[in-house]
Image (cartoon, rainbow, N blue to C red):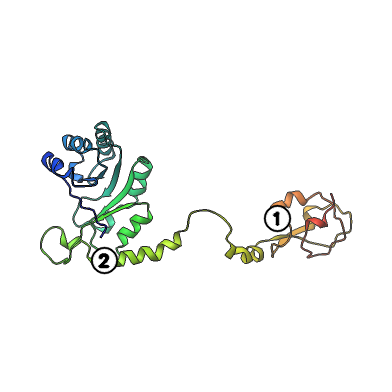
């Protein structure tokens, strides 16, 4: 099914047991300040996913320094609120952006503990803010007893999330600022051209009072306003003529 087995260790024995079995280690927020456990995990050489709930930036700095000093080279940070369930007002998803700015060398993700809603908007928002790893508790029945099931997602939630991502992803584009082929007609018709404001004879030196700007953008752009002022007309021009470069003498 393409699903990797991963388990979170809470002591040294668990690290040693899991090392040959998991492709990476997940370290819980509770162990962010557990220096011996961090060192033990780092010395396995496996990639590490570190949750940073209920922590300060200074504690994250120390944890990262500890992991790297012990040999860790691939570390991901998961923004997390260590409160079950997390109120929407406390989710603070913009922290994903803040962590990405402070730790550009780390992959960023989000561990979600909000009560799931249709489409999992918390995960969608985290993804849109740059989270590459998304973590959420999973259950087949949210009514089961315990401290996890009621804020976990179901298979239905996951399907809804997938549909939301598939719907939104095409809207995101590549981030390149270009004038698209689909915009060309609007670009021509909506933009302005320099237009003659009054009748001008051949050889007239153009002043600012002689020109204005109007649609469409099929003539000389107002971007060249200052370049046109002071030039002479190559032919007689009438009011409302759309100025072309050929209308100006050298």
Residue 222 shows which numbered tag? Answer: 1
Task: Specify whether 198 is left or right of 74.
Answer: right
Q: Position of residue 223 (x, y in %)?
A: 69, 53
Task: Specify whether 185 is left or right of 199.
Answer: left
Counting the numbered discs, the total is 2
Please name the residue shown 81% across and 56% down the image: 246
Please name the residue shown 24% across and 63% down the image: 116
- Graded by Cα atoms within 10 Å as few (under 14), some (14 to 19) or many (20 or more), the crowding at tag 2 reads some
Identify the element where label 2 is drawn: helix
Q: Foreground: 229 or 82?
A: 82
Q: Position of residue 107 (x, y in %)?
A: 33, 45
Circles 2 and 1, Cβ within 8 Å, touching? The answer is no
Task: Specify whether 40 is left or right of 119.
Answer: left
Q: Which residue is mark 2?
A: 157
- Specify the quadrant of the image occupied by residue 98: top left
Q: Position of residue 132 (x, y in %)?
A: 34, 51
Q: Foreground: 4 or 137?
A: 4
Q: Foreground: 9 or 130?
A: 9
Q: CA distance from mark 2 to mark 1?
A: 53 Å
Identify the element where label 1 is drawn: helix
- Specify the quadrant of the image occupied by residue 122: bottom left
- Graded by Cα atoms within 10 Å as few (under 14), some (14 to 19) or many (20 or more), the crowding at tag 1 reads some
Most distant residue in the right direction: 202
Q: Position of residue 168 (x, y in %)?
A: 40, 63
- Specify the quadrant of the image occupied by residue 1: bottom left
Which numbered disc, 2 or 1, marks the residue that appears first in the sequence? 2
Q: Foreground: 194 or 136?
A: 136
């Amino acid at each position: 099914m393409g699903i990797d087995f991963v388990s979170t260790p809470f002591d040294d024995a668990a690290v040693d047991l899991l090392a040959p079995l998991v492709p990476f280690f997940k370290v819980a927020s509770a162990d962010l300040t557990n220096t011996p456990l961090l060192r033990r995990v780092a010395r396995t050489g496996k990639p590490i996913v570190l949750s940073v709930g209920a922590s300060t930036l200074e504690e994250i700095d120390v944890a990262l320094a500890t992991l790297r000093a012990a040999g860790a080279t691939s570390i991901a940070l998961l923004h997390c609120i260590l409160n079950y369930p997390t109120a929407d007002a406390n989710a603070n998803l913009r922290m994903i952006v803040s962590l990405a700015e402070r730790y550009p060398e780390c992959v960023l993700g989000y561990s979600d503990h909000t009560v799931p809603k249709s489409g999992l908007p918390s995960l969608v928002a985290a993804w849109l803010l740059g989270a590459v790893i998304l973590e959420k508790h999973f259950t087949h029945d949210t009514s089961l007893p315990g401290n996890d099931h009621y804020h976990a997602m179901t298979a239905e939630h996951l399907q809804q999330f997938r549909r939301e991502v598939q719907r939104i992803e095409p809207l995101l584009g590549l981030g390149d600022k270009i004038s698209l082929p689909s915009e060309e007609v609007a670009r021509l018709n909506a933009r302005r051209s320099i237009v003659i404001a009054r009748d001008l004879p051949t050889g007239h030196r153009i002043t600012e009072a002689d020109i204005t700007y109007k649609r469409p953008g099929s003539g000389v752009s107002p971007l060249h306003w200052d370049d046109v002022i002071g030039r002479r007309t190559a032919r007689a021009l009438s009011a409302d003529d759309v100025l072309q470069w050929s209308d100006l003498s050298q």
